[in-house]
Amino acid sequence: MASYAPPRLFECLPYDIHFEVVRHLDFVSALKLASTTRFFHQTLDPRVIHSGEEVEKFIRERDKADQSRVEGLFACYHCYRFLPKDRFAKKATFERQSKKGQKITDEGRRYCFDCSAKYRVYEHLRPISNGKLRYYFCHNCGQYKTKSAKCEGPPLDIDWEHDEVPASCGLKPVTQRSGLDTLPAHLLKMIVSHIGYDDALHLAMVTRTLKETVQPVKWVALHTRFRFLRDKWAMDTLDVEIDAMEAFPCYMCCRTRPRSKFTKNQLHMVDKYRQSSWKMRCQGCVQRIYHGHGKNLMKTEYKRRRMCEICKCVRRGRETCGGCMELYVKGAIDRRTMYPDTTLNRHHDYGIFLNRLDGLFDGQDWEEG
Ligand SMILES: [Zn+2]
Ligand SMILES: [Zn+2]
Ligand SMILES: [Zn+2]
Ligand SMILES: [Zn+2]
């Protein structure tokens, strides 16, 4: 929560000195300084203080290094932000390994939707797709609209800063941000971490801002997501033989996906070893785990996962089990069950430890073909 610590000595110096300090640092160090405290984050913007060349070099390096990351963010070479793919025109986000993609990165020719609107990159009312939806950019009112709300008429010869919206653009949609929309992302994240996976998915559908901010797969607690998918699958496939099932859950991307999205090996394993079906993951996720290069967050996450023998939910090794925590709060299990390591006398009670190891060895290790 917010703390009101007294300002530190260095913070009390005049802005000119902060400015000079940042100017003499290399760009990465400047970024680090700007992220040390809230004060510096709000007052220092290394992107503005440093020369464009330096910033661009940094952005380009990060953009290239980002290829194997799970997040799949792309750099905008004009506002120097890393944004998700759907904030760019589709043709600006070719795979970075491909020739066209490399060319865009090398020449720094990628504009996000905000920047392309600002610099009028696309022609008046020409359709632009981000891979999901098709937008029409209007030079008169400076807005992207979908087909149903698209503006009409030729570009007018008026000053772009003009306050009046031309009649051909229709009324500006009333988009007053209200309620949850106005909350900062970290508060939303905290709220989402306490609600069910289905509630989080619904929340992300309420408004466009929430859709862009809320990330159910990352924010909802692991055991909650797991339980939702597992129970839904169990309900959907009640009395259905495995061979006849049309959809399966992927516990990595947390979606229920059609049979065709899973490898033969995965389907075989779920049939043969029902007790380890919590490892089920779709073909796309298998590929992301085993064929990515460099730092692979998904692989790390996958390797940390264990099945909790007490609450029968997925947990992460070395983290307190979220499912057990819930049971403990409800009073269903006692503290000794929840924290066996800390409450037992290590010298006398080996038997209990050995029992707890059971779960580690009876599950077959899944090999990918
Ligand atoms: Zn931009
Ligand atoms: Zn318009
Ligand atoms: Zn998946
Ligand atoms: Zn547990």
Image (cartoon, grey):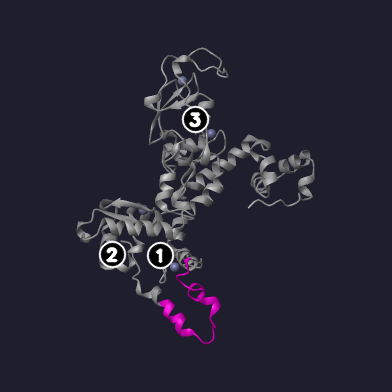
- Spatial CA distance of label 2 from label 3 is 50 Å
Which mark is in front, 2 or 3? Answer: 3
Q: Secondary structure at mark 1?
A: loop
Above or below, comparing residue 256 to residue 213 in the picture: below
Q: Nearer the viewer, residue 18 or 346?
A: 346
Residue drawn 51% across the image and 48% down it: 65
Residue wearing tag 1: 313
Q: Nearer the viewer, mark 1 or mark 2?
A: 1
Specify the amino acid type for callout 2: Met
| Label 1 or label 2, whichever comes before in sequence order | 2
Disc 3: residue Cβ within 8 A of ligand 2's nearest atom? no
Label 2 vs 3, first from the N-terminus:
3
Q: Specify the farthest residue to the front.
A: 331
- Relative image position of residue 78 (x, y in whole percent): 56, 33
Residue annotated with mark 3? 175
In the foreground, 185 or 140? 185
Q: Is residue 104 left or right of residue 45?
A: left
The residue to which callout 2 is attached is: 269
Q: Is 343 a magenta residue?
A: yes
Graded by Cα atoms within 10 Å as few (under 14), some (14 to 19) or many (20 or more), the crowding at tag 1 reads many
Amino acid type, label 1: Cys
Q: Using a 10 Å C-alpha cutoff, classify the residue at mark 3 as few (fewer than 14 neighbours), some (14 to 19) or many (20 or more).
A: few
Q: Amino acid at mark 3?
A: Thr
| Quarter the C terminus occupies | bottom left
Please check the rendered image and state whether residue 336 is part of the magenta-colored stretch, yes or no.
yes
In what element is the residue under mark 2? helix
Residue 10 percent location from the top left of the image: 77, 48
Q: Look at 52% across and 31% down and name the residue there.
A: 176
- Foreground tag (1 vs 3): 3
Q: Is mark 1 within 8 Å of ligand 4?
A: yes
